[in-house]
Each structure stands twice: as structure tokens, then as C-alpha cells.
Amino acid sequence: MTAGPVTDFLRHLRSTAAARANEDCPDAGLLQQFVTEQAEAAFQTLVQRHGPMVLRVCGDLLRDTHDVEDAFQATFLVLVSRASSIRNASLLGNWLYGVAYRVAVRARANGARQRAHEARGVDMVAAKPVAPGLEPEQQIILHEELNRLPEKYRVPVVLCYLQGKTNEEAASQLAWPVGTVKGRLTRARDLLRGRLTRRGLALSASTLAVILTQNSASAAVPAALLSTTTKAALLVAAGQAGAEGVVSAQAAALSKGVIQTMFLTKVNVTIAVLLGASAIGAGGGLFAFHLPAGDARVAARAAVKLAPRVAADGAKQEDETPDALRAARLTSANKMKQLMLAMHNFHSVNRLFPAAAVYDKKGKALLSWRVLLLPYLEEGDLFKEFHLDEPWDSAHNKTLLAKMPKLYAPVRGPSKGKNVTFYQVFKGKGAAFEGVEGIGYAEFTDGTSNTIAIIEAGEAVPWTKPADLAYDANKPLPKLGGLFKEGINAAFADGSVHWLKKDFDEPTMRAVITRNGGEIVDPDKLRNDK
């Protein structure tokens, strides 16, 4: 036996002994040890303590054993990255539940993209057995609704049902009265039952309790998975190379994507609350799009006035005030910001932006990128309803037009037809969308902050139809800006959204449509200050 294996064996023995000594240490203490000392035993104890619950969540949401293990490792890699920023370590189990759910959902979305490329040409891995009483899709619904519960109700459910603690143990950990734990568990079950019933899954209170507890996370994490996860965590925490050899590329991509999402979601929520009260699309690049002083208050007031008149079918509004128009403009900009967030989440998982369409094997466009983006807009169930090997107007897919997410709907009208959208992309040679596979960051040699990804087109199209703005350097530009007379919202590939003028300089516009033209751009020729 060589020195390497001997060293690893002794190190494992020491780590295991130290982990046993940490069994009674609270999560906050273990987390502090890991953050300040990169203590292997402390992290291993956390994985042993919370790993069974994480493994259950990943197993409930994913179908393949390898995917489950990737999602498990990714969850704890996220913990490594965010350990120092967790505000209440006594709720670590609840925090990890939320991360495990996000990771598993992202892994499912990645599988959805694979299905899109395969176009049903390859059979999926057989579904794993699940707890009696719930089918795999019902397990997904259960976790979706559990994840949406307010934290004060979700916390005791995670502790008592998913982690198998008694009411008294949960009360001691949370510093709550036992009566509070019991009361919130009852309220959580009532809320869950109501939400599940509305989604077609009617369960009695006792049945729901049994389903939540029958798979309570009590089994130990497999030794090999515990070891590789702990080793990868230490390498990442120390900033050392080599983690790639310990965890799969998929696990690394999942953790990176969720970390980015957690950060961007906070930014996006702040923007959404104020309809752009801070800068929509602030940051580097050619533009610095800031909401003028006082517009935030005006937009917030106008949004209330505007809401009853904004129709999903683009019905005409004849009584819009300047404030209402400004609010509509900011609402549209925020929608585009959310679409770009989904685009970046797609890229985090797949290393590419989505292609402009779902293509068949002969290169024929079947469905729009707007369909491909659904799993990243929390519309995974709708995505699964599509027949990805059929065109948008097939007998089946055409029935799904009426299920257009509100995010795609026009903020004002008029527009021709129902279930249409103005949000389109440029596709063609040199544009952000070219070819049948999608484009990665590295191919934006002009910079993502200098390349338009999504824009308000001149005319609306059915949202599932692979109809976008064809770009050709030798042909006139397509019509733009069908939502507003005053200007055009454009989302750039870096995620920023800018307000452009209608009488733009055409060479400058062509320069920001292309991703690799190498042009020198004067932003004043595009920027709309009105």
C-alpha cells in the first residue's frame, strides 16, 4: 500500500472521529467552524445531519440515480459558497431544503432541454420507485407547494416531517414553544392540502401527514457520496483546483447556476417591486439606463391606474395618461429583464443560450425559444405538455396557445389576435441567435453588453410560433417598436434593458444587433432620453 492511500485512510479515520465528537454541536457552531477554519469534520457532520433530507428531496424530484447524486453534491457546493452569508444557521435545514429544491428543479430543466434535442427519439431512464400513494408527478407537485409555503410554516414541516424530529426537538432547536410548533404544523398541513386540492391532488390531513413522514430522511448518506462531497467542499472552500475530478461537470454546473440565480433573484425582486425604481439594466457597457428622479413614485402610482386597462390580448386603451404610458413602459422593461434572467439561467445549465427555435433533424423550426425557456420561468409543467417533435400549429400544440404565460403578454395594445407577444429575438448571421444549437458567451466578441438579445418587435406573433426578426446585413431592418410610439425597449445579452429611440441611427442599430462585428458604437445615436 502506498503512502497516498495510507494518508487518506488515516485522514478519514481522524475526520470520522472528529465528526462523531461534533454530533451534539448545533448547526451554527459547525458552520462557524467551517467558515473560519475550513474544518473538515464540521462540514462532514453537516452533510451527515442534513444529507438524508437533501437526498430525499433530490430523489423525489429526479428520475435517474446519477442525477440525484449530482443534485445532492451541487446542493452542498452551494452551501460552501454561501456559508458565510447564511443569517440564521438554526434554520439551516430549511435553507438546504430550498437549495435542494432549486437544484433538483434546475436538473429537471436540464433534462427537459435534452428531451428537446432528442425530440423523443431516445427513451428516458425508467422512473425510480417512489413512496406509496403518490406518483412521480404528484411528488413534484407536493414539493412545489411545500417550497411555496411561508417560511414560518415550511420550517417545522422540514424539521418534523422531512428530517424526522419530534415536536419537542424542533421546538428546542427553533427556541419556539412546543405549542407554536404544533400549531404551525397544523396550519401548514391545511395550507398544503388546500393548494394540492386546487391542483387536482385531494388528500386528507392524515394521508398528507403519512406521505410526508413515510419517507422521512432517516437513512445515512452512502459513505462514498459523503466522502466525495466533503472532499469537493474542502477543495472549493480552499480555492484549490481538483474539485472537477471529485464531482461531475453536471454537479459543478448545477451549483454554479443556482448560486447565480440566488444572487440575481434578489436583484430582480428589488427591481420588480418598484417597477424599475433603481436602474433597470445598470452596469457596464455602452449604456447606463437609470430611472429619472421621481419616475419611481410616478410609475408606482400609474401602475395601479394602468392595471385594470392592461389586457392580455392587447386590447386597445384610449384613455392612457403619460404616467400610465410610463408605467407600461417600465412594466415591459421589467418583463424583459425577467426573460433575460431566464436566458442566463438556461446558459448556466447548458453553457449556451437557447436556440431561436426547437428544430427537427432536417433543420425545420418547430417551436419558439419562448417554449424552450418555460422550465426557467417556473413553467415546467406547461413545457412538458408540448410535443417537441411537432410544429407549433399541430393539432396538439395549437391547443396550448391559450396557456401563454403572462410574462409574454403585451402590456398594452392594440395587437392582432390573442395569445401573441411582441418579445422577439434577432436571428441570422452574426446575430445573438444563429444556428440550431444556440450561442455561448465566448461568441459575443463585441461583448454581451453591446449586443441585443430580445427587443419589442414591430408586430406581435403567436407566442409558440418560431417567428422572430430575421437579420440580414444586406436587407432592410425588420419593423421594431410596436408597443410604444415614443421608443423601444431592448434587452441586451448581459441582462440589461435599455430604452431606445425610434429614429435611431441605422448603422449603430446594426452594430448592436450583431455580436461579432467589431464596430465602434456611439450610444447617443440609440439612447432615448425622453
Image (cartoon, helix red, strand yellow):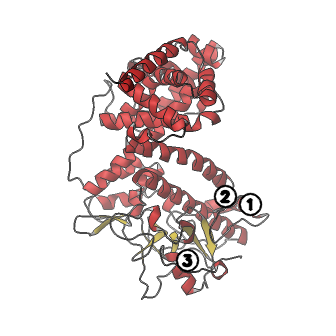
- Inspect this view and state whether residue 122 appears: yes
Q: Give the answer, above or below, for where 431 lies relative to 150.
A: below
Labels 2 and 1: the sequence-earlier one:
2
How many circles with numbers are drawn on the protein? 3
Amino acid at dot 3: Gly
Graded by Cα atoms within 10 Å as few (under 14), some (14 to 19) or many (20 or more), the crowding at tag 3 reads many
Q: How much space separates mark 2 and mark 1, taking CA atoms? A: 7 Å
Residue that carries the numbered disc 3 in the rendered image: 481
Amino acid at dot 2: Leu
Graded by Cα atoms within 10 Å as few (under 14), some (14 to 19) or many (20 or more), the crowding at tag 2 reads many
Amino acid at dot 1: Ala
Q: How much space separates mark 1 and mark 3, taking CA atoms? A: 23 Å
Secondary structure under the numbered disc 1 in the rendered image:
helix
Q: Give the answer, above or below, for where 50 lies relative to 61.
A: above
Q: Residue 410: percent from the left, percent from the top? A: 53, 66
Residue found at x 59% / y 86%: 505
Residue found at x 62% / y 60%: 308
Secondary structure under the numbered disc 2 in the rendered image:
loop
Q: How much space separates mark 3 and mark 2, taking CA atoms? A: 20 Å
Q: Residue 322: percent from the left, percent from the top? A: 71, 72
Query: Do the residues under discs 2 and 1 have CB atoms within 8 angstroms?
Result: yes
| Numbered label attached to residue 275 | 2
On screen, residue 529 versus residue 236, left or right, reads right
On screen, residue 86 versus residue 134, left or right, reads right
Q: Viewer-proximal residue, 154 or 68?
A: 68
Residue that carries the numbered disc 1 in the rendered image: 296
